[in-house]
Amino acid sequence: MGKVSIPVPQNGFSIRNFSTSKRSCFTPSPSTLRISCSGVAELDGSHENKGGLFNFNGIKGVACGILAACTVTSAAFPVTAATQRLPPLSTEPHRCERAFIGNTIGQANGVYDKPLDLRQCDFTDEKTNLKGKSLSAALMSDAKFDGADMTEVVMSKAYAVGASFKGVDFSNAVLDRVNFEKADLEGAVFKNTVLSGSTFDDAKLDNAVFEDTIIGYIDLQKLCTNKTIGDEWRVELGCR
């Protein structure tokens, strides 16, 4: 008998307990989900198959192996703010000024030749040099953009955890797949702004303006869980 047992985190993948009269392929435990695939014959002389012998054991082994692979894949690659590893803070001189040039390649998919590291930079009240720039995949955590004009900016896949955007004008900007976790967006203006795929966990959205915002239904439901959004704009967004 051959047996392969693969333990994976329970929160990585969820499978209902499956059992048969002889054995269970999946054996959950309180802390882990363990997938066990056994290779032992299920058919003996007492089973008749008028159409010829059929190797159910082989089929079950293949199915169990596929599910195990899918489970390991799902468990091994979750990306969350809590586990994401960032590169060390850049020591490049004038790295903050690179925002005025922006990321010149890979606007939508966040591809870059070198990281656009704007962490801890201060762009307070910057009214000219950020407008329309591509800041795709920029690292913005703990940076300050308060009062800046960021109209028509492209920030696809930017990492803005803990950054401050108080009073920023994001009109006509593309902010898809941005991580705004714990960011301060009080009074920010999202007018005709693309917010698809962006997350706002624990972000401050007091007095933020959402007018003609472009956002998918699932993303909208997540956004609406943020209780700091004002009543007027909850109605505008369609929060229930």
Image (cartoon, rainbow, N blue to C red):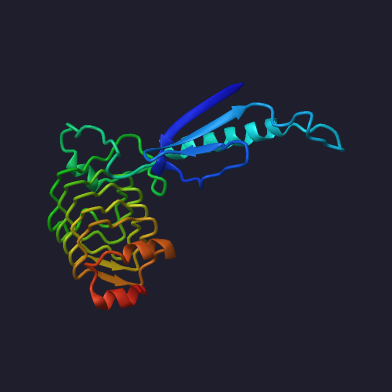
Between 105 and 13, the one lying in front of the other is 13
Between 2 and 158, the one lying in front of the other is 2
Residue 94 % position (x, y):
16, 38
Q: Is residue 38 left or right of residue 193?
A: right
Q: Is residue 120 above or below residue 34?
A: below
- Examine the image and state in which quarter residue 215 appears: bottom left
Between 235 and 156, the one lying in front of the other is 235
Between 163 and 105, the one lying in front of the other is 163
Residue 127 % position (x, y):
17, 59
Q: Residue at x 35, y 60 (%)?
A: 195
| Quadrant the N terminus occupies | top right
Q: Is residue 36 left or right of residue 185?
A: right
- Residue farthest top in this picture: 1
Residue 17 % position (x, y):
51, 45
- Residue farthest front in this picture: 46
Q: Residue at x 27, y 43 (%)?
A: 82
- Examine the image and state in which quarter residue 41 appears: top right
